[in-house]
Image (spheres, rainbow, N blue to C red):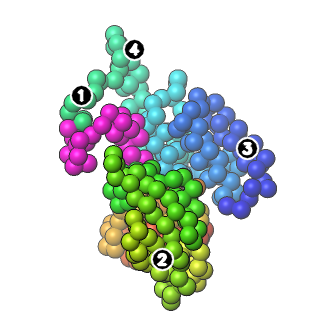
């Protein structure tokens, strides 16, 4: 965000958000949720003492915050501070979350043992094998149970690029220098000797021809040069006084768009999900309406206040 010189302010804001949440137990992932909220407030210039003055359910708080206040990480003793709970989730979702909280507390009070159902690991493993289309190891199984989204992202990367862990770490992060050679053990008894020969000049589309040797055989491939500056796409800014113009709350990447043109939405419905600094932020409808225009696509990068979508009555 280019604000490292303001780190003391951000650190103080983290402490204030922690107290606002009720001084919760902070381990991964709850500590990250506090950090997500602190950075969110910092990026929008909202002071912690002003959060309770926001209209319930209208502010696009980070996805991790919404999940935690909905019970995604369990419940603190006594539940969440109610005024804050309502502001973050909105009246309807607050009531639903509070009802779940009370139900779990009653169940906990009457249960003789654990309040969690025993997982059928054999069934879960079979389902995971079906998704992965290969045998699931114990690491696969427990990783998918504890971190389903992270595991899914990891598996997609492994599916698209194979097992990059076999590469030497410097080569993975920084690439090879001309005439540099590495050996890669891809499996027992199979070793690849890779030597970079040369990197060509950039072409009009920003790609370069890379010449390399693979076990002594010369080969070529095209590689996109990400360091070549590409003219930034100029986007219109939203009129912040018009609730039907949906703007980007923070600079970031468009992660998903669960609606399409013609989709009827109600106030508070999810329109887009953005990602920035490993934090997800949901952009919700501020009014009832119908999606009339979508100006962005998944994977595009936008700046704060860029116009993302338009609604009509």
As measured in the structure, the alpha-carbon distance from the residue carrying label 2 to the one carrying label 4 is: 65 Å
Q: Nearer the viewer, mark 4 or mark 3?
A: 3
Picture quadrant where residue 237 is located: bottom right
Q: Which residue is mark 3?
A: 11
As measured in the structure, the alpha-carbon distance from the residue carrying label 4 to the one carrying label 3 is: 38 Å
Picture quadrant where residue 304 is located: bottom right
* Farthest front residue in view: 216
Q: Nearer the viewer, mark 4 or mark 1?
A: 1
Location of the C terminus (image quadrant): bottom left
First in sequence: mark 4 or mark 3?
A: 3
Q: What's the residue at 68%, 45% (across, down)?
A: 48
> For the residue labelled by badge 3, is the local secondary structure a helix, a strand or a loop?
helix
Relative depth, front residue between 219 and 50: 219
Q: What's the residue at 29%, 24% (across, down)?
A: 117
Q: Nearer the viewer, mark 1 or mark 2?
A: 2
Q: Which residue is mark 1?
A: 120
Relative depth, front residue between 59 and 174: 174
Q: Residues within 10 Å of mark 4 (few under 14, many from 20)?
A: few
Location of the N terminus (image quadrant): bottom right
Q: What's the residue at 27%, 40% (across, down)?
A: 136
Could you tell me if the residues under marks 3 and 2 are in contact, i.e. CB atoms within 8 Å? Answer: no
Instruction: Name the mark on residue 210.
Output: 2
Instruction: Name the mark on residue 109.
Output: 4
Would residue 131 be counted in the magenta stretch? Answer: yes
As measured in the structure, the alpha-carbon distance from the residue carrying label 3 to the one carrying label 2 is: 45 Å
Could you tell me if the residues under marks 1 and 2 are in contact, i.e. CB atoms within 8 Å? Answer: no
First in sequence: mark 3 or mark 2?
A: 3
Residue 8, compared with residue 121, is above or below; it is below
Question: Could you tell me residue 45's position as x and y percent?
Answer: 70, 57
């Amino acid at each position: 965000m280019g604000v490292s010189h303001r780190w003391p302010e951000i650190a103080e804001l983290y402490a204030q958000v922690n107290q606002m949440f009720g001084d919760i137990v902070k381990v991964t992932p709850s500590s990250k949720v506090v950090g997500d909220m602190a950075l969110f407030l910092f990026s929008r210039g909202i002071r912690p003492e002003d959060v309770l003055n926001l209209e319930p359910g209208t502010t696009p708080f980070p996805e991790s915050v919404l999940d935690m206040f909905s019970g995604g990480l369990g419940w603190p003793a006594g539940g969440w501070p109610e005024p804050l709970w309502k502001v973050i989730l909105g009246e309807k979702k607050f009531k639903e979350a509070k009802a779940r909280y009370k139900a779990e507390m009653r169940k906990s009070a009457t249960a003789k043992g654990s309040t969690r159902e025993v997982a059928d690991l054999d069934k879960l493993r079979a389902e995971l094998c079906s998704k992965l289309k290969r045998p699931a190891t114990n690491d696969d199984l427990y990783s998918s149970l504890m971190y389903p989204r992270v595991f899914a992202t990891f598996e997609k990367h492994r599916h698209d690029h194979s097992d990059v862990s076999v590469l030497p770490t410097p080569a993975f992060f920084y690439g090879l220098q001309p005439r540099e050679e590495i050996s890669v053990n891809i499996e027992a008894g199979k070793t690849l000797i890779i030597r970079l020969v040369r990197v060509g000049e950039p072409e009009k589309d920003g790609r370069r021809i890379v010449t390399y040797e693979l076990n002594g055989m010369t080969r070529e491939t095209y590689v996109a040069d990400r360091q070549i500056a590409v003219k930034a796409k100029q986007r219109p800014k939203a009129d912040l006084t018009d609730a039907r113009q949906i703007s980007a709350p923070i600079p970031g990447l468009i992660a998903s768009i669960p609606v399409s043109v013609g989709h009827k939405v109600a106030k508070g419905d999810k329109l887009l999900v953005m990602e920035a600094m490993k934090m997800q932020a949901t952009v919700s409808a501020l009014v009832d309406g119908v999606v009339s225009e979508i100006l962005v696509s998944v994977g595009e990068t936008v700046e704060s206040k860029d116009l993302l979508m338009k609604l009509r009555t």
